[in-house]
Amino acid sequence: MNSPKIQYSTVSVLSAAHLINDIYSNFLPQLLPFLIAVTGFGYAKATFLVSVFTLSSSIVQPLLGYFVDRQGKSWLLYVGTFWMTVFLSLMGLTTNYWVLVLLSALAGLGTATFHPQATALLGEVSGSRKGFMMSTFMAMGNTGFALSPVVFIPLLDRTGLNGTMYLLIPGILVSLFLIRFAKVPQKDKISDENTARASFRDLLGSAWEITKIVIVIVIRSTVYMGLIVLLPNFFSTQSLSNIASGHLVSIMLFAGAAGGLAGGWISDRIGRKGVTVLSLLLSTPAFFGFFYTQGIISTLLLALAGALLMGSFSVTVVAAQEVLPASRGLASGITIGLSMGLAGLAVTPIAWVADVYGLITALRLLFILPVAAGLFGLLLRKNRNLSQASGVAS
């Protein structure tokens, strides 16, 4: 049986665009120290800008994904990153708090627009290697996220808040790049009510499986976001400099990108469920190993823990697309958008634990949570005859 052809050029273009898009997605946390220094905003007030961006970039993604599946509007892919950079570039030009809140919300809509169309198109051009190709796409996004401090902190340190205007230039270039090299197949608008009802019935029939995938993602993403917030504070209590702390967090993030790439490749061979469960269960002892060791051993275990934690990142997106094969945009919107938004809200109780019971207790809680996600992952269904369906040998 002939396997669907993989369009490597389109995968490469989408992955490169994802890297640039997600560099911007992590811009606001880099902006906050400079913004606080100029405006005098408190930490809670400033951090709320990040929460607004996260919510606006996540909640609307399922709706946009449904829109993509029904009508396939190519402009959603072409303008998403540009839209985000327009509003982020304006944030250095005002100190009015509510204007900044509005700009954060509008900027979040840009990355929400990019992801459903990009992941839906990627699913169409990945042929028999959907796990590996999606992991490549996701790894590039995670790499961009990890690069953000390296790119933006030196820029803002040199230019001040006015330097945000320079953000607009790459946004324009990404849009032109996608228009030129990423051709989105045009779909006819679906007006057949029977087809719409069938699609809705398919979603309802898969609701429990999608819910299970979302629960796994929310727990995993809560750990990921919680560590990004709390680890720098922990390192500061260990008398590490901000630069050294940033390097250690970046090591975890880069290792996570590599782990996601490996996880996608392995999942094409042994299945999505196996990779998801094993990687999550094994990450907990790696995190505790990092915590109770020192020096290079501790750093290597932190990298290993990051790789294991994020080993199922792309795998769960592909699993959702396989549950809803006719609604890839919706599946991506739920797993990348809605799930990440819920995780962003779940980080707040973790921070409360740190305030009330101490930073060490909160970190230990985060280290244990992957076990809960892995055990719940045992409820996920196995891939149906994966080796034959994908054309990949087991």
Image (cartoon, rainbow, N blue to C red):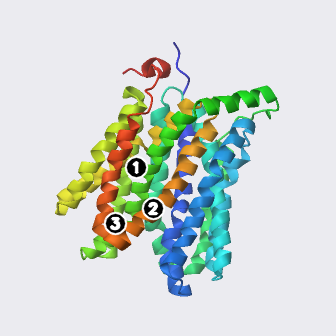
Residue drawn 46% across the image and 73% down it: 153
The quarter of the displayed image where residue 143 is located: bottom left
Q: Nearer the viewer, residue 168 or 186?
A: 186
Using the numbered discs, state the Cα–Cα distance from disc 2 to disc 3 in whole angstroms. Answer: 13 Å
Q: Label 3: how many residues lie within 10 Å, few (<14), some (14-19) or many (20+)?
A: some
Q: Which residue is mark 2?
A: 347
Residue drawn 74% across the image and 43% down it: 73
Using the numbered discs, state the Cα–Cα distance from disc 1 to disc 2 in whole angstroms. Answer: 21 Å
Question: Judging from the image, what secondary structure is the residue with disc 3 in?
Answer: helix
User: Residue placed farthest to the right in the image?
Assistant: 191
Using the numbered discs, state the Cα–Cα distance from disc 3 to disc 1 in whole angstroms. Answer: 18 Å
Residue drawn 46% across the image and 17% down it: 388
Q: Is residue 68 left or right of residue 371?
A: right
Label at residue 331? none
Residue 200 showing in the rendered view: yes
Q: Position of residue 108 (x, y in %)?
A: 62, 60
User: Residue placed farthest to the front in the image?
Assistant: 356
Residue drawn 32% across the image and 58% down it: 365
Q: Which residue is mark 1?
A: 257
Q: Position of residue 207 (x, y in %)?
A: 58, 35
Q: Position of residue 118 (x, y in %)?
A: 61, 44
Mark 1 or mark 2, whichever is nearer to me: 2
Amino acid at pointer 3: Leu
N-terminal of the two: label 2 or label 3? 3
The quarter of the displayed image where residue 5 is located: top right
Q: Which residue is mark 3?
A: 231
Q: Label 1: how many residues lie within 10 Å, few (<14), some (14-19) or many (20+)?
A: many
